[in-house]
Image: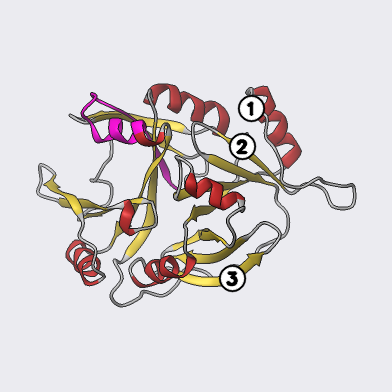
Amino acid sequence: MDVKRIDRIGMAVADLEPHVALLEGLFGFATTRRTRDDAAGVERALMAVPDTPDIEWEVAAPTRPDSYLQRFIDGPLGPGLHYVRMRVPSLSAAVEDLRAAGIEPRSEQAGTPERPVEEALMHGHGFQFRIRGPGGPEPRSGPPPAREGAVGITAIDHLGHAHGDCDELAGWYRRVFGMRSLGRVTTSEFVQVVMETATGQLRWETMHPADDASFVARFLERRGPAMHHIAFKVAEWDAAVSACVAHGLQPFRESTGATDDGARWADGFIHPRQTGGVLVQFFWEERPGIWGRTS
């Protein structure tokens, strides 16, 4: 499939307002517009991400118990990361490519000659992807200015997808979305393949547990194959940790390291219980490219 741009990452939460406040206050996102779909029983906030003009963030919550979003939240995959939306030059061509790969997408629209289907949905290994044609330009306000007291995000670095076999999942991403593998990493807890999207906007990690005691194994036991975490790069490590603590969040699994010539890096996580169901990793590197990279 010819993916031209990844333009949105969506998450689903039970209660919209606290998470909008957290994303604005701690992460420095800026709400650009609000929508409410009474037919679907969903309310949404669309947000700009610091230093990321090409990808917007959506946080959505159900407004009634029979909403499809409530079913997602109540299921094994929710709450948390809900979908990634990709733009393609031709939706019909993308649908044919998916069918050739053995994937039958669906649409929430009936479609007519006057109003053709704009978006197709597909599920792959526990995660939803939305494929959208070029359409018209959507209003974007650009990345928000730096917010005092926020963690200081400078980029969305990658999404991590847990699976029983990281090589099998990496092969699926190569076939379906044209991603390319950059390398393979093995630790005491997991094995992963590091990949880059065809658009070059961000990276993907496919990961499987190194043994039954791994945190990845526990995740798979609870949720099955699913998106495991999202990682952000920050400008200053101490400032990012201080911002978390000021918001009542204590980072965990903090690590530090350095290259042979002394360039330092640090990373840590924020628990999904504190972020609406999303495991958030954030990292800092003294020199670009020294953290989490493979040769």
Q: Where residue 179 sits: x, y (%)?
A: 49, 34
The kind of residue tagged 1 is Ile
Q: Earlier in the sequence, mark 1 or mark 3?
A: 3
Q: Measure the alpha-carbon separation of dots 1 and 3.
A: 33 Å
The label on residue 207 is: none
Identify the disc placed on residue 34: 3
Residue 147: x and y in percent read 35, 76
Three-letter residue code for mark 3 = Arg
Which quarter of the image is occupied by the N terminus? top right
Residue placed under numbered mark 1 in the picture:
103
The amino acid type found where label 2 is placed reads Met
Residues shaded magenta? 202-221
Which residue is disc 2 drawn over?
122
Residue at left offset 48%, top offset 54%? 11
- What secondary structure is found at the residue carrying circle 3? strand
Give whichever of 130, 154 is nearer the camera.
Answer: 130
Q: Position of residue 271 (x, y in %)?
A: 28, 52
As drawn, which residue projects farthest toward the bottom? 148
Identify the residue at the far front of this view.
65
Instruction: Tell whether position 245 is magenta.
Output: no
Which of 151/213 is in front? 213
Q: Earlier in the sequence, mark 2 or mark 1?
A: 1
Q: Residues within 10 Å of mark 1 (few under 14, many from 20)?
A: some
Quadrant assignment for the C terminus: top left
Asked if 164 appears above or below 119 in the picture, the reply is above
Q: Secondary structure at mark 1?
A: loop
Q: Is residue 294 above or below residue 7?
A: above
